[in-house]
Structure formats: C-alpha cells, structure tokens
C-alpha cells in the first residue's frame, strides 16, 4: 500500500521493500530507449511529416511541432510531479483514478487496453508489410504474413525474456535510425547553409495558417508513446526517480529532434511552394530527399531502417500493452491469471503471452479474409490506437491538473500553470485528431469514421462496471488503484 505521513498529505510510495534489488532491472537510460522507441523517430518522420506538409500548414509545419513539444513538456511537468508520489504500473489508469475518481479510472483502464492493443496489432501487420516491400525490392517474393509472424515471434520472445534485453536492441536501432536523419540534416545544412532554416516557417501568419488542425494532429501523433515510461515502474531500479527523469529527457530529446528535422525538411524543399513539392513527392518525401542529398545507398539504408524502426516501435508498444494488462489483472479488473510476474526475469509473463496471442488471432483474421494490409488494415488499427492514446494523455492531463490543484501549496505555481496548459493543449490535440480521424486512418469508409465511438462506449461500460463493483464487491472496489505493483 502507498504510505501517507497523515491522511491529508499526498500519497508517497515507500519503495524500499516493494522493489528489492533484482536482476534485469531497468536503469534510466534503458527506460529512455524504450520510450523513444515507442515514439519511433524515423518512422514518424517518414510516415507523418509528408502529411503534415502536404495537407497541413506547408512551410509552417515546424510551428506545430514546437506547439506540440511545448504542450507535452508542460504535461511532463505535472506527470513528473505525480510520478514521484504515486509509483504504479497502472500509469494513466492510476493517475486518472487519483485525480478524477475510481469510476473514470476504471473506464480509462479498459480504453488503455484497447488503445495499446490495437496499436500493437497494427504495428505487427506494418512490420510484415514493410519487410515484404524491402524483400520485393531486393528480388525476393515473401508474403507479408511470414514477416508478420516472425515479428510477432521475435517480439514475444524478447519481451518474455526480459525488458533489459529488449531495451539493448532498441538502443542500437534508435542510435542508427537517428544517425540517418542527422546525416540528412547535416547534408542539407552543408548544401543550403542558412537557407536550411527558413525564417518563413515561423512567420506570424503561420501560427493560424490553413491546415493547422492537420499539422497539430500529425505532430502529436509523432509523440505517441512518450508517456509509456511509467508502465515500467515495477521493472525500474529506482522508479520514483528514473521514471520522471526518463520522461523529461525523452520528450525534450524527441521534441527538439522532430522540430529541427521538420524545419530542415522545409528548407530542403524550399518554403515557397513546400506544399506543392511535398504533394509531388507523396509518401516517399523523406526517402526521396535523403536520396537527393545523401545518395541512393543512404535512401536504401533508410528504407531498411524504417523496417527496424517499425519493429522497435512494435516491441515497445507490445511491452506497454502487456503492462496495462498486468496492472489491471493485479487490480482484479481482468482475470488474475494474467497478473503472473516472473521475479527472476522481471517480466509480467502472462500478460506478455496474452498480448502475443491476441496479436496472432488478429493477424490470422486479417490473413484469412485476404485484406490488403496497407490499404485497409494497418492505418485503421494504428489510427484507432493513436486516437485512444492521445485521449488517454488528455484524460491524464486533466486528472493531473486536478491532483496538482488539490496540492497547490506543495506543487507551486510553475507546476500548476504547466498542468493547466497541458490539460487545455491536449484537449485541443484530441479535438484535432477526432476531427481529422479519416485522414489519420487514410480510409474514408463510413464504418471507419464511426470507429472512434468505441472509446466513449468503452468508457461508459467501465463506469457502469465500477458502479456495479462498488455495490457487489465493495472490498475489491475499495482496493482499486491502491495496491502498489
């Protein structure tokens, strides 16, 4: 149980007995790599930046990344404040429960399972699809289903083995994929000099340019996954310190990197007519620019590393989904058999296996109907997962704001102000994503447009279940989000 000096003081967890020294514990650098892997720098730039420039604000896209980064840094300020006081693998579920009450916390918990689960399913299919494209390019005809099955097996084995092993692999992938984009940035700067940083990108009129909603949506989707650090509380060596620190470092590093790369990409295109040029390049914008400035070999390497980036993201999101399953099973909100934790390997083994099995079932269904994975499946699954995670961020921001306001003397004006800004900003981000969901999913079918309704329905079901739980099983209800995991 969390310890309180007196009932009126904030909840501060005594972790000295809860987290004794174990093998395979995660240090701050490894948590940072897990968080950055979930955000997928290379995949985000290749996949999302062309949409932001072409259909969003064009040359003014860097403003959207600046806004998104500032809002998420503000969010991380409150996130770190509550994270130092409440240490739990439940992450957003626990924070929403603490800030807004148990019924909303329960509803949020089930929404989290759907969000991270569908995201993981989509990423597994994406790994298969992009691996197939690379294989075709080098002369091998291998079905995406084979590559997807290999990705699921490899991810399951790595995450079942221990997260410190996975994080070491992710570290290598992240360093290499980041280096590719940094080399691109460097060659553009060498070729264009100061023109690589066009001041027109931050012109006063650009802050309210046409397409701002689309650019904000794509900017925020590039950050999805940065919040996952708290899910590794049980596996961290020093969660009260390392989780907030890792969150701060990750969001600042990701934000600065995205901002500079987006700005330099606009410089490479030329701010005048950036939209038209991005439309001409299409979805291969970044790869084509890498070929133009760094050569065809560099572009081919970037294409291969895109596959590695997708795998790294899949490993990280699969791990995050399994931690939510584990946390809810420990609370009794899912079957308790899913709460089995291997203390030797420091892994929630049952939840990890459950997510892997669910992924196999999902991909098996997709394969059985013969659907085109890229045209009809991957964008929808990743889109609905992205929407859900941003909704979770918004809910957590509101909950953290309420938590901070109740403890305003302890928090101080900076944390209070940051929490309010984060709640407002993420509310705007959620509105942008909901408004542009068909663009995010790239599928305009009427059924797809209604898919976001799954979240309010799930939230309502969670609220109803929590009311029933309070009446039928008051002892279980009373313990929700209180037991430290």
Image (cartoon, grey):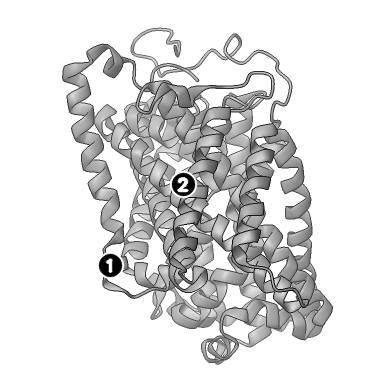
Total numbered labels = 2
Ranked by sequence position, the earlier of labels 1 and 2 is: 2
Residue for point 22% across, 22% down: 469
Residue for point 52% across, 26% down: 84
Residue 210, relative to residue 480: is it above or below? below
Q: Which mark is residue 298?
A: none
Q: Residues within 10 Å of mark 1 (few under 14, many from 20)?
A: few
Q: Nearer the viewer, residue 1 or 206?
A: 1
Q: Nearer the viewer, residue 332 or 34?
A: 332
Task: Please tell me in which quadrant of the rendered image residue 213 appears.
Answer: bottom left
Q: Residues within 10 Å of mark 2 (few under 14, many from 20)?
A: many
Q: Which mark is residue 116?
A: 2
Task: Please tell me in which quadrant of the rendered image residue 459 appears.
Answer: top left
Q: For mark 1, what is the residue?
A: 447
Q: Nearer the viewer, residue 236 or 466?
A: 466
Work out which residue is located at the far front of the displayed protein and give it.
Answer: 368
Q: Position of residue 258 (x, y in %)?
A: 61, 63
Q: Position of residue 230 (x, y in %)?
A: 53, 34
Q: Secondary structure at mark 1?
A: helix
Location of the N terminus by quadrant is top left
Image position of 354 (left or right of 468): right
Q: Is residue 197 visible?
A: no
In three-dimensional space, the C-alpha distance between marks 1 and 2, rounded to whole angstroms, equals 21 Å
Q: Position of residue 387 (x, y in %)?
A: 39, 56
Residue for point 42% across, 22% down: 336
Q: Is residue 160 visible?
A: yes
Residue 306, relative to residue 347: is it above or below? below
Q: Secondary structure at mark 2?
A: helix
Judge depth for marks 1 and 2 and give the one in front: 1
């Amino acid at each position: 149980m969390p310890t309180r000096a007196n009932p009126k003081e904030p909840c501060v967890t005594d972790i000295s007995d809860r987290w004794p020294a174990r093998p395979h514990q995660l240090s701050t650098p490894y948590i940072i790599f897990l968080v950055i892997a979930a955000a997928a720098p290379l995949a985000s730039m290749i996949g999302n930046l062309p949409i932001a420039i072409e259909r969003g604000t064009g040359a003014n896209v860097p403003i959207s990344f600046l806004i998104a980064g500032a809002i998420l840094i503000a969010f991380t300020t409150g996130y770190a404040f509550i994270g130092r006081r409440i240490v739990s693998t439940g992450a957003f579920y626990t924070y929403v429960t603490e800030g807004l009450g148990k019924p909303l916390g329960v509803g949020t918990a089930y929404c989290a399972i759907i969000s991270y689960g569908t995201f993981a399913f989509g990423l597994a299919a994406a790994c298969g699809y992009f691996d197939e494209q690379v294989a075709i390019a080098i002369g091998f005809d291998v079905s995406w289903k084979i590559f997807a099955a290999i990705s699921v097996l490899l991810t399951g084995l790595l995450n079942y083995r221990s997260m410190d092993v996975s994080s070491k692999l992710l570290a290598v992938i992240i360093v290499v994929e980041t280096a590719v984009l940094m080399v691109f940035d460097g060659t553009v700067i060498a070729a264009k000099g100061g023109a690589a940083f066009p001041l027109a990108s931050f012109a006063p009129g650009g802050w309210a340019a046409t397409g701002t909603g689309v650019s904000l949506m794509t900017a925020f989707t590039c950050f999805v996954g940065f919040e996952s650090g708290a899910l590794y509380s049980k596996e961290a060596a020093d969660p009260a310190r390392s989780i907030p620190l890792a969150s701060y470092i990750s969001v600042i590093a990701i934000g600065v990197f995205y901002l500079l790369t987006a700005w330099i990409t606009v410089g490479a295109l030329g701010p005048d007519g950036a939209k038209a040029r991005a439309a001409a390049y299409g979805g291969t914008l970044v790869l084509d620019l890498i070929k133009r400035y760094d050569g065809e070999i560099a572009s081919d390497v970037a294409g291969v590393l895109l596959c590695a980036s997708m795998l790294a993201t899949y490993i990280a999101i699969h791990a995050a989904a399994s931690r939510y399953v584990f946390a809810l099973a420990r609370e009794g909100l899912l079957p308790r058999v899913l709460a089995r934790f291997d203390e030797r390997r420091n892994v929630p083994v049952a939840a990890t296996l459950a997510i892997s099995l669910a992924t196999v079932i999902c991909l098996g269904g997709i394969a059985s109907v013969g659907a085109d994975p890229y045209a009809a499946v991957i964008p929808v699954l990743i889109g609905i997962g992205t929407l859900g995670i941003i909704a979770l961020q918004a809910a957590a921001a509101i909950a953290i704001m309420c938590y901070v306001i109740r403890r305003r003397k302890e928090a101080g004006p900076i944390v209070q102000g940051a929490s309010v800004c984060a709640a407002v900003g993420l509310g705007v981000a959620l509105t942008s994503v909901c408004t542009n969901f068909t663009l995010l999913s790239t599928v305009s079918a009427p059924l797809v447009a209604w898919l976001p309704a799954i979240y309010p329905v799930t939230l309502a079901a969670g609220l109803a279940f929590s009311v029933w739980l309070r009446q039928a099983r008051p002892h279980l209800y009373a313990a929700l989000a209180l037991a430290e995991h």
